[in-house]
Amino acid sequence: MITTSWEEAVPDDNQRIVLLNWLISRSTTHAREHAAPTISGQSLLDILAGRLVTKQATEQMRSEEGAGGSEGEPTHSIMRLSDVHIETTERHRYVALLVKYLDISIREFSVEDMVDFTGREISGLESERGVTAVHLMTRLPRDESQLDLGRYRCVVDYSAPLTRKRIEYFLCRQLRRQAEAEEWKFSANVKRSKRGKVITKEFKYVPRLELHMDVSRGLNIPLSTGTPELSSMKFTKRSERQSIGKKADVKHEEVLANIQIVIHANQGPSEAQEKRNWVSLIRNHYTGLGYDTKLYYRHVNGSVIGGDIHQAIDGATDLLLCPREFLSLAEPVSVCPRTY
């Protein structure tokens, strides 16, 4: 039997968990045969810093039901970029983002006296809500001459309910707003006639910053009943431009439509490792084309499950599957608001 002293059993009050991740830069476009240019991570982070200075780095979480009542009260939870800090070394540049989540549902919390055990509720002002803050630290190449593949090592504070999924949503929404306001476009050569005439056409595109983990959620999720069996994969692309004119038609017509592609797992190899590689290749292909991915699993009893997961489970999954480190700090991290 192993015993520890009281001092060893007391946890470090200033210890924090950080999740080791990759920050991936990629771009999406409606161009069917052409890939949009990939913007460097430094340029995209500079855009976020600029939106902070102009007080535009704020997003309302509109997917949630509003909890505000009277006029003037908040109606949605809010995410905002609170601070940007840059450190440069001989080989790398480190960019730290402080992201905050103001939860519309948290207006008060309970406290209790440690001597006489009397308690009370502490409430914020009419427009004040509970806040959670996390740091996202990304390592970038120091100079433009260094190799930049659009894939950067990063660490994320673990602090529920501000999960990796919400942070990624915030970053992508901010970059989309910037790209749409400035009408980002790229040029590509397109054949427009049977004679093979080539013209130059401009396509709109949107940059993204995505958080990827080293350990995939896809196929090896441990459950009490064993590893679930993959049933199918669904790839969805919203508002894709499609041609509805026939080859012989003089008038060329196009429409916008939502596309869904379903690939059943039984079409892949039977051997487990080969199937994982097969699934990975298919997911990478359609993700690169701008499709959203959902995986459907089959329980041992034959039922199929799928779709999004609860926010609390999402945070627990981050903690379970992401490689992580424990940092012991000399003093608590301050999340006091900063005024610009």
Image: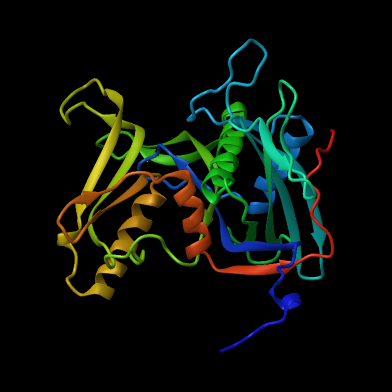
Question: Which residue occupies the foreground of this view, 247 or 232?
Answer: 232
Q: Is residue 16 left or right of residue 116?
A: left
Q: Is residue 96 left or right of residue 207?
A: right
Q: Is residue 8 left or right of residue 230?
A: right
The image quadrant where one finds the N terminus is bottom right
Q: Is residue 142 visible?
A: no
x, y percent for residue 259: 28, 36
Tally of marks? 0
Residue name at image x 55 percent, y 23 percent: 67
x, y percent for residue 326: 67, 69
Residue name at image x 36 percent, y 64 percent: 221
The image quadrant where one finds the C terminus is top right
Q: Is residue 72 visible?
A: yes
Residue name at image x 21 percent, y 22 percent: 250
Q: Quadrant of residue 240?
A: top left
Eyeballing the image, is 96 above or below 169?
below
Q: Quadrant of residue 142?
A: bottom right
x, y percent for residue 34: 41, 45
Residue name at image x 69 percent, y 74 percent: 9
Question: Which residue occupies the foreground of this view, 3 or 186?
Answer: 3
Question: Which residue occupies the foreground of this view, 205 or 220?
Answer: 220
Eyeballing the image, is 32 above or below 38?
above
Question: Which residue occupies the foreground of this view, 73 or 284?
Answer: 73
Eyeballing the image, is 94 above or below 75?
below
x, y percent for residue 90: 81, 70
Q: Is residue 225 left or right of residue 318?
A: left
Q: Quadrant of residue 194?
A: top left
